[in-house]
Image (tube, rainbow, N blue to C red):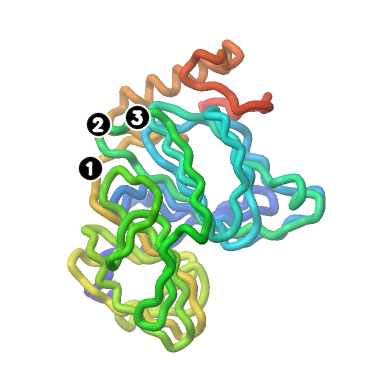
């Protein structure tokens, strides 16, 4: 393996009934990259008319989520009163903090007509001292994100800072998250100024420092290295990383720096469900929702 690559992580695929998800983080030997603690590729999937995604209301604590689509649409509803549809190139940045509940469903027009869905969902752990901040949600349309060319490749900055650019979302620790498109024959040097960095090949044929990458695989870069990412065919990549936050505990949809927070969140979700989700509780359902995902046993 190239000295520029510290570790390679092959995504683990799960079939959710005609809809494939490939999970990369957390991995057994690589729980996080910078503050990124969860990295899932959704699809590509094609839904027939009348079919779609229905992720019932569920809780989060101690993290921020970002959904980024290449194709399709998702409707986000949460306990803050937000009802927003995300489309390709946009960013939905939800800060869970001390606790939020949300659902994700296919919007009615796409469900009626049939549609494709393809994208990446990630979780970003919050630093100690900010794990219990007030929950918040921000939608950033594609046109508001820095979009630039470097070494013949095209990059859109989703979060944080990279190569002198800064994305609009408010972040809580040093971080970067990029969507890159490399034309055939292009080569970009990855001299990004962050402590931990990784490259995920979504599609195409590409090499890192001359070593072939596989679609659906994440390459964690050696600290301080500046490898060249070269594309033999048009390729799509996601680059992520930042400053490490230290060990994090994770259970279901909860992330915390200590296990006691997870224990309390489990009790609060079960208690809220048993009480019918009272409006003054830590966890409440989004407006109009009557379902929820029970706590796993």
Tell me which corner region of the image, top left, top right, bottom left or bottom right, holds residue 127: top left
Residue shown at the point (22%, 42%) measured from the top left:
246
N-term-proximal mark, 1 vs 2:
2
Q: Secondary structure at mark 1?
A: loop
**Mark whose residue sits in front, 1 or 3:** 3
Vertical order, 242 against 104 (above or below): below
Query: In the rendering, at what x and y percent does residue 174 appear?
Result: 26, 51
Residue located beneath label 2 in the image: 129
What distance separates the C-alpha of mark 3 from that of mark 2?
8 Å
Q: Is residue 290 left or right of residue 69?
A: right
Query: In the rendering, at what x and y percent does residue 258 appear?
Result: 28, 29
Residue located beneath label 1 in the image: 246
Q: Quadrant of the N terminus?
A: bottom left
Residue located beneath label 3 in the image: 133
Q: Secondary structure at mark 3?
A: loop
Residue shown at the point (42%, 23%) measured from the top left:
265
């Amino acid at each position: 393996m190239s000295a520029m690559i510290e570790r390679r992580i092959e995504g683990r695929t799960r079939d959710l009934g005609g809809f494939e998800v490939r999970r990369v983080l957390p991995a057994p030997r690589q729980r996080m990259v910078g503050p990124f603690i969860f990295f899932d590729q959704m699809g590509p999937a094609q839904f027939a008319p009348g079919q779609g995604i229905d992720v019932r209301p569920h809780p989060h604590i101690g993290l921020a989520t970002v959904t980024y689509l290449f194709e399709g649409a998702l409707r986000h509803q949460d306990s803050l009163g937000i009802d927003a549809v995300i489309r390709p190139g946009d960013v939905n940045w939800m800060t869970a903090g001390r606790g939020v509940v949300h659902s994700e469903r296919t919007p009615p027009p796409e469900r009626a007509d049939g549609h494709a869905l393809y994208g990446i969902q990630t979780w970003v752990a919050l630093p100690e001292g900010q794990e219990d901040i007030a929950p918040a949600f921000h939608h950033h349309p594609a046109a508001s994100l820095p979009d630039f060319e470097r070494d013949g490749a095209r990059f859109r900055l989703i979060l944080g800072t990279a190569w002198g650019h800064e994305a609009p979302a408010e972040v809580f620790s040093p971080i970067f998250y990029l969507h890159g498109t490399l034309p055939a024959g292009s080569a970009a040097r990855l001299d990004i100024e962050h402590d931990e960095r990784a490259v995920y090949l979504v599609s195409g044929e590409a090499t890192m420092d001359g070593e072939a990458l596989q679609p659906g695989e994440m390459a964690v870069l050696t600290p301080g290295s500046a490898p060249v990412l070269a594309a033999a065919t048009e390729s799509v990549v996601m680059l992520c990383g930042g400053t490490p936050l230290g060990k994090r505990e994770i259970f279901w949809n909860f992330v915390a720096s200590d296990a006691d927070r997870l224990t309390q969140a489990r009790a609060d979700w079960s208690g809220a469900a048993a009480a019918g989700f009272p409006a003054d509780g830590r966890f409440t359902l989004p407006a109009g929702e009557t379902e929820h995902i029970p706590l796993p046993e």
